[in-house]
Image (cartoon, rainbow, N blue to C red):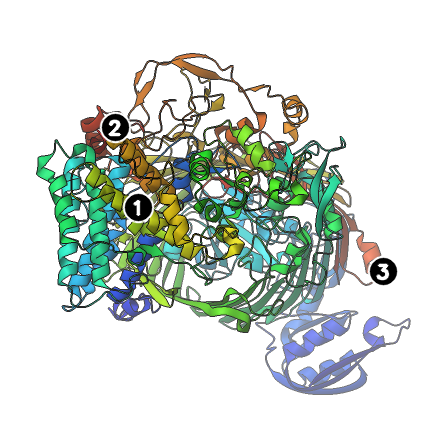
Amino acid sequence: MIWNGCTSSFDDLNTNPDATTKVSPAMLATKVILDHVKSASSDNSEFMCKRMFWGEQMDNYQYNRVEKGSFSAIQGLTNAQKMVELSSESNKDAYTGLYYYLKGWAFYRTTMDMGDIPYSEALQVNEFRYPKYDEQKEVFKGILDDLEQADSHFAKATEGISGDPFYNGDPAKWRKATNVLRLKVLMALQKRADDTPELQIKEKFAQIVKEGNLFEGNDDNLQVTYSNKDGQKNPFHQDLTRSINVYAGTTTLIDPLKKYKDYRLFSYFAPMQALTDPIYLPKGETLLEKNDWNAYQGVEAAGLFNTEQKKISNKMHCRPNDIYRTDYVGVPSIRLGYADMNFVLAEAVERGWISGSAQNYYEKGIRASFEFVRTTVSSPEYNQGMTITDEYITQYLKGEDVAYATNGTSLDRLKQIWMQAFLASYFHLAWDSYYDYRRTGYPELPINPETNLNDDKYKIPVRWLYPESETNYNKEQLINAVNRQWGGVEDVNKIMWVLK
Amino acid sequence: MLFVCIGLAYASESYSQSATLTLNVNNKTVQEVLDEIEKQSEFHFFYNNKQVNTNRVVSIKSKKKDVFNVLEQLFNGTDISYKVLDKNIILSPKEMLMSAVVQQAIKNISGTITDSNGEPIIGANVLEKGSTNGTVTDINGKFSLSVPNKSTLVISYIGYVSKAIIVGNQTVFNIQLTEDTQNLNEVVVTALGIKREEKALGYAVQKVDAKALTSAKSIDVGTSLTGKVAGLNVKNSTEFNEAPSLKLRGETPILIIDGIPYGNMTLNEIAPDDIESIDVLKGATASALYGARGTTGAIMITTKRGSQNEGINVEINSNTMFFAGYLAFPEVQSSYSRGYGGKYNSDYVWGDKLDIGRTAIQYDPETFEWREMELTSKGKNNFKNFLQFSAITNNNVSVSQKGKYGSFRTSLTHVFNKGQYPNQKLNKITYTAGGEMSYKNFKLEGSASYNKRVSSNDNGSGYSGSYIYDMVIWGGTEYDVRDYKNYWVEGKEDEQQNWYDNSWYDNPWFKANEVVDAYDTDILNVYMNSSYEITPWLKAMLRGGLDFYSKKNQWRNAKSANYAWDKNGFFGISRNSGYSINTDAMLMADKTWGKLNMNVLAGGNIYFYSDDKLRSTTAGGLTIPGFYSLKASVDPISASSELKRKRVNSLYGKLSLSWASTYFLDVTGRNDWSSTLSKETRSYFYPSLAGSIVLSEIITLPEVWNFWKIRGSWTTSKQDAAVYDNNNVYSVSTNVWDGLGTASYPSSVIGGNVRPKKSMVYEVGTAVNFFNNRLYADFAYFRKLESDFIISGGISSATGFSSVQVNFKEERLRNGYELTIGGSPIKNKDFQWDILTNWGHDKYSYFKIDPDYSTKKPWVKKGESWDWFDIYDWDRDPDGNIIHNGGIPVKQNFKTKVGNLTPDLVWGITNTFRYKNFTLNFTIDGRIGGMSYSRTHQMLWNSGAHKDSDNQWRYEEVVNGNKTFIGEGVKVVSGSVERDPDGNILNDTRVFAPNDVVVSYEAYISKYHDSTSRPSRQNVLDETFFKLRNLTFTYDIPQLWCGKIGMKAASVSLTGQNLFLWAKEYKYADPDKGGDSSGYESLNSPSQRYIGFNIKANF
């Protein structure tokens, strides 16, 4: 037909000249690496871990009201898959390593959030649109395998990753990060170390440490450094987090810092305005210097909202340090860090998983955290002149509560490690402190049955509910998983396998 | 050259002898000469054009000669003779004239035309059959005319049956016209611009009285359609420059102008004064011939082409309206300051008590410093003080002319709208010129119209960053906004606004002038339609339409703007342009054999659409504050572009059969080839069938029942995908991180061959008329089943994708009723009352559930409605009491359906009362049902600004430091509850007791009325309302007076719009606009009442 003949140009017409089917693996790498690393800081995580309090309204995380989780980290892996597909022979190993690293990460976080999740049937859209949920143990087995794959691909890589904004594509650095992550995953399985021989938790941990491809200093940190460029600005700047001025440090974080005479206090927080700014000084109070320890006071994380809020409205609260609020460069956010790795290693020594000196790891961790703060908050304008010198650090390590309790019980020492990990994680390692708390119970986060919005007033929730998209579209498999784990009950206080 | 000059010497002699003519004619037809003489003198020519060849070309010269001389010149040498009887001149072949003159003596007749009640009919046409000789009746229904003896008079008037009367020997006639029993012969414009008698249609069509559009002119014609069409739901916005949303049977109808479905034209581009008629084709059958784009019904606009009467006609229509109060206004408390915890601060309005001598460190706009000042409610009327007096003017001038071979019309409209927020100005110009001409069998019509709109600032509405957001929700009343008119900090002009806040809110004067979204749009559309009558029963037609638009947007914000595009300053510019071409070629045949009439149409259409967008913005701020240019960008500028094209080729045909004007049947078919689908699925066919029977022609009905018709229709229609929907491509961004670009794969699996979406509609209806058209009703029932939706079907995100592009197996049903009842309860010479009522009810339900892709929410079931609105409700005990935890209400972790988005009933009543020269017209319309989440209501509470939050609990808390509030509901004393993932209870051992926990009122209220993205159940409101939409009170200036000042007609009106609102649950925002398509109302601007006046004059 003549008419049909007129449709020959139709495919051209319907091809978007402004979109492409061809991209470089580097562009996909940039996308997936940014998505991964930029999520290293989260205010919700700070609220949940009671390091920070939000003064505007009763925040759900602040008061332990946890709702639905998300599978978006897994969904994002499609881009990583495409990245590998597009890679060439010469850089395939580096990209494949990155893929397995990200895959391990995504499933680790997702299962840690919710419990059983799809793994064996996941990421195969052509075969499984409604993938079944695997038992958490199986998911972890897969995660460990994936991360091992990542390690071996990075080890083999002869060419780097193009498009990597943080490690400049260096496979050796990615390999280190992979192994640090492996240590963290294995430590997350700590409660199952003795009754799950098939996962070889301790053995693997020891082997990774033995192989030694681990972080050697803060320079190896996987972290995002912000700058004064559009889209790269410190996300807590008041232009971007507009209510940052009513964020308040809590006693949970500030009290130990003050008790330990920890100079990080001055870099983490700004002093209370009411006591340091003459215009807001209440009658009868004396004006304090900005570096006066008494100018720093936390709000009660589990206090009655309006009581705590009143402190904030009276400016009797410690806002995050000006460097977070008013500086576009701010402080880098760490996704995987050298300090944290040392605390994991210290715990492993304490638990007898590896040999070595726990104290050494512990002190290295603390030192690393101080050094990080010293370099990133270097201006007296921000640290109130409380410069962290090497002498100071040495002094600090000898402090009464900080000095490693070699004479105490193992639990005493573990508590020291966990506390230091908690203090070092301020605005870093989003949600890691929460995972650690679920596993260890330390530091003891305040729970107030009067204000707790969790259905169980004496607990902090231990998981998120499964995503709404799963109840909408993958209901059958979801119900199987909920039946298997908790007799059909979907609740934020149900204990998942890894925490049992 | 044709030049006629008539010199009149008033003497005692007869007119024919005294009148002199001056003519200078070269090669003109006899017809033209006669016409000119008639026009310039009082002479009338009588002739039969089969006998007198008026196409003969002549040349005449006459200087102040009498008519005999001219006639002699004209007909010299022909067989035509003439007879002059004073002003009447008869032309006839010589041999016939002698006898004819005897019989056809010209005489003067007179008479009165009345209706069936004996009331005179003003303006009825009285015409001598077969001639142009005629007159109209005067105010008393009287006429006088000179006619030949043997002639026939034809008397006609709109709405009445025409009558033919043989003159004979009578000289005085008293003629009674009977009312036309119905829109029986009402002609409506149907698909492709074809005019049809309404009784022949098998589907619902409603005509809108276009005259009313020009008396109370709104900015957008859409507003004037509110309540005027059963089944059409118009949601009118209160925002500056925002067009109303029109939903016909729940879907957006296509706009057709003069038969052309343009790609870029909207109702906004059409001036009400240019509209001849509006016909709303309600169902897919009606617009089946428009293919995919017509599946949702059509609004058919026919524009004016020329004047009704011959000669030149100049019309002026001027309308001015201005602000006259508010219908819905967001009110606030003025007892407590900004702040929280009962203390003054720069956020929230939960601050300290005002006016009791308390002080706080506040910003001083005079010194630009913070200092201790008393807290007083000096800004009680801040929002009103900021708003400006708004006004709308709408002026139109049109000139039209009608002559023998055609007509021409040109019209210029200017609309000026000054919005309620400072720096809101809209200027709109519509210029249109068009005409039609016919010569022999050839007819041509065409028009072009140009529309320009310039708007100074559209910014400032919605949730974040709107004026209501800044001033009403979060603003407080302890400052006086008028003190901030000087919006720069001295010495920091272009760098720092003079304001108390530096994170969320802006000085409104600063916002109005320094945070600007301005645009400039040009739209041009041209249209051409030519037809040629090949034989009396066969016609060929070629029609083309093209529209072109260009829109330039400019955004800018000064440094220090808190809620804008970039706090460090911003400038952005975009140019969007596009065009569409729509061409039809058709052959139409019409033939009658006895009682059978057959009408066949076959045609083809090509539709092409192209849209082109370019946008560039600064990034990272401005290097030079106040320099708004891309050159001022700190970082490399960010730019994007987009090009969309689409083409659809179609072939269509229609067969219409009728028998004895009683039985009617229409069959249509259309096949489309669309570029948005893949090769395999791009060709698709859809048929339609429609029929009607005029039962009143078959059945003998009671005498008062004049007309009864039943109709039915069925259509399948198909809809292609959107442009590029099936493109499986990466999204790419540049310079995301240190110069690196990113790419991402689509989150939906694309690549299958999707079929076009399908819908099947059937419709039945009936129309009745009683008491000679004094009462009429039309009822329609429709049922539309939609299937094969092209969707992004949800899948588990664990697949790496969130959805798959597929044809949905879910089937959705829309059905509904429409009822129109109208009539003229009272009608006599001086007084007439017309009433028109429209009622529409739609229901949307699931017909079939897709086992995979339908959401598995508990209420998604066959037979249940699909326009649900769900939220996280409060956790409740079995009796429905809200459960409290620590005195604070607890939200559920799963969603619950709370209602439907669409109203149960949309209605409108229009009344017209006419008493002598006075006419009062008003429309009341409204909606019943339909839910939306009101952000205005929730956030007024949440922020602490709500009027009702000024109560004892708050006072005790803020002033005396006592918590006294106990939330209404229960608390859990013991036990727990277990739920499945849908929230169904598996096990419940909870024991409840009345909540007795005393909590902070502020903490409770800001949780009970949660943050903006978390709708609370009590703020999901029923949108039920009604409005007095418009009112016009018109005085038609008597013809007598008009004539004295050279006018044909004139009228003055008092007009009002948006005059009164009653709402069931909405209080601080206008439910007319209500929620958006997802049911969210976002701080609708104050709803304003407008009153004004209208002047029309016709020369």
Whether residue B378 is situated above or below residue A209 in the rendered picture: above
Do the CB atoms of the residues marked 1 and 3 lie less than 8 Å apart? Answer: no
Instruction: Find disc 2 in the rendering and name its residue.
Output: A495
Split into 4 quadrants, where in the image is the N terminus of chain B? bottom right
- Of badges 2 and 1, nearer the viewer stands 1
Q: Chain of mark 3?
A: B
State the image coordinates of residue A35 (x, y, percent, origin top left).
33, 54
What chain does mark 1 sit on?
A
Q: Residue at x 8, y 37 (%)?
A: A198
Q: Residues within 10 Å of mark 2 (few under 14, many from 20)?
A: some
Check disc 3 and report the residue beneath it: B1044
Badge 1: residue crowd in 10 Å (few <14, some 14–19, many ≥20): many
Residue A260, x across and y down, in percent: 42, 39
Q: Which residue is mark 1?
A: A363
Question: Disc 2 to disc 3, how far (Cα)?
Answer: 95 Å
Name the amino acid type tagged 2.
Ile
Query: Relative to residue B562, is residue B694 drawn left or right?
Result: left
Q: Position of residue B329 (x, y in %)?
A: 66, 39
Task: State the SS at label 1.
Answer: helix
Q: Are marks 2 and 3 in contact (CB under 8 Å)?
A: no
Q: Report the amino acid beneath label 1.
A: Glu
Disc 1 from disc 3: Cα separation? 106 Å
Q: Earlier in the sequence, mark 2 or mark 1?
A: 1
Check residue B1014 in the rendering and tell me which mark sits there, or answer none.
none
